[in-house]
Amino acid sequence: MDKETSEVTPAQGTTLCIKNMVCPRCIMAVEQVLARLGLTPLHVELGKAVVRETPDEAMLARLRTGLEVLGFELLDDRRMQLIEQVRNAVIELVHYRDSELRTNLSDYLTARLHHDYSALSKLFSEVTGTTIEKYFIAQKIERVKELLVYDELSLGEIAARLNYSSTAHLSAQFKSVTGMTPTRFKQEKRNLRRTLDSV
């Protein structure tokens, strides 16, 4: 078995790193692929699946194919695995843990991934060509778009939920990233949102 693709912890099973998992439906889709191939998922979360078995090369090849059909990718390279962990941690923070957005991003990622933030930041920039901070802002803007489309919260409430210092700060950052104001975005009839894995 390729040690770069998976980590084996006897008591916990085999951990597989999977790229492009961005939502609860992705988790369900990966669980279905694993089960269909005869693997026993012990735990599946964004970017990671733990299975009871230790897949051999043939099984990993079938798994890779099954995941690719759905737009996922089994990650072999340790650096890419770490990048995907950073992406998934940011997506989870911005889209599913509003209450934790008041936490300092570097502290959150250090605690979550058990790596020094400066090392994570350097690796992320080298591999992706952008900074973690810019990626974080891009994800926040996608979350703002989502909340604007739902039309349940005022701009001030959205700013507070996403830990912006003011509505003006949110509006300025939104315009800087999208080229339009939040108000203009809401007036547009077409959907200008992006999928989370394309951010």
Image (cartoon, rainbow, N blue to C red):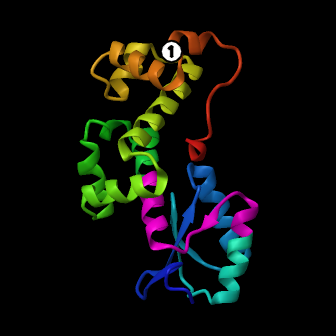
Which image quadrant is residue 62 in? bottom right
Which residue lies under the disc numbered 1? 182
Residue 140 in the figure: left or right of residue 190? left
Q: Is residue 149 visible?
A: yes
Q: Is residue 84 magenta?
A: yes
- Percent from the top left, x then y, of residue 186? 58, 13
Question: What residue sits 63% from the left and 51% below the top?
Answer: 25
Q: Is residue 87 magenta?
A: yes
Depth check: give the residue in front, 127 or 180.
127
Depth check: give the residue in front, 37 or 182.
182
Residue 96 in the figure: left or right of residue 36? left
Which image quadrant is residue 168 in? top left
- Vertically, is 145 above or below 29? above
Near mark 1 (Cα within 10 A), the count class, few <14, some 14-19 or many ≥20, is many
- Vertically, is 176 above or below 114? above
Three-letter residue code for mark 1: Pro
- Quarter containing the N terminus: bottom right
Depth check: give the residue in front, 32 or 127.
127
- Percent from the top left, x then y, of residue 122? 33, 56
- Under circle 1, the secondary element is helix
